[in-house]
Structure formats: C-alpha cells, structure tokens
Amino acid sequence: MITKEKTAELIAKFGDSPKDSGKAEVQIAILTTRIANLTKHLETRKKDNHTRRGLIMLVSKRRKLLNYLVKTDIERYRNIIAALELRK
C-alpha cells in the first residue's frame, strides 16, 4: 500500500507542481512503487492469484506510459528510466 506522504513525495520529485499528478513521469513513479510493493507481497504469498493479476495489470499500464514517452519525448523517457533504475 502506498501512503499519501509517499505519493506526495513522488509528485514533488517528478512533477512540475505539488498538484501535478497527471504527468506521465509521476504516474510511472507511482506505478513503480506499487509494483515493488506487490512483488514483495507475492514473494511470501505465492498462491495469491488475484494480486498477481493486479500486478500484471499495473506492469502493463506502466509499459503503455513508457511507450507513450518514447514516442513523444525520448529525453524524458531516458530521464525517468535512469531516475527509477528500471533498466539495468
């Protein structure tokens, strides 16, 4: 579960203003945090298929947002990949 404080911190870091939660980078950062939390949850609960389905949906949504950034502004894409360390 992601807290309001963590969400506000991500918005402040990746957004232009404190209320800019619609920017693609902010959405990707929030999704990445949620994905990390669900992955940790599924390590201990291997048979939780409902959560696994939700995780797959979140990964798909993040992938779509990353594809959008690649098409529109490759520099923003590279910055968010480096900041969140998605590619190793």
Image (cartoon, rainbow, N blue to C red):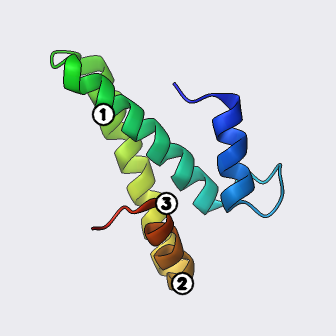
Tell me whether the residue at label 2 lies in contact with that at label 3, contact meaning CB atoms closer than 8 angstroms: no
Residue holding disc 1: 39
Label 3 element class: helix
Compute the Cα span from label 1 to label 3.
20 Å
Distance in Å between CA atoms under marks 2 and 3: 14 Å
Q: Sequence-wise, which precedes: disc 1 or disc 3?
A: 1
Q: Position of residue 49 (x, y in %)?
A: 22, 19
| Up/down of 19 relative to 48, above or below | below
| Residue linked to disc 3 | 65
Residue furthest left as drawn: 47
Question: Looking at the picture, how far across and down is residue 33, in whole percent?
Answer: 48, 42
Looking at the rendered image, the disc whose residue lies closer to the viewer, 2 or 3, is: 2
* Location of residue 25 in the rendering, given as x and y in whole percent from the top left corner: 59, 61
Residue at image location 21% in from the left, 19% down from the top = 44
Residue 65 percent coordinates (x, y): 49, 60
Crowd band around label 1 with a 10 angstrom C-alpha radius: few (<14), some (14–19), many (20+) = some
Give the quadrant of residue 30. top right
The residue wearing badge 2 is: 75
The disc, 2 or 3, on the residue closer to the chain's N-terminal end is 3
Nearest the viewer among 28 and 5 is 5
Residue closest to the eye, 18 or 52: 18
- Which residue is depicted at the point 39% across and 63% down? 85
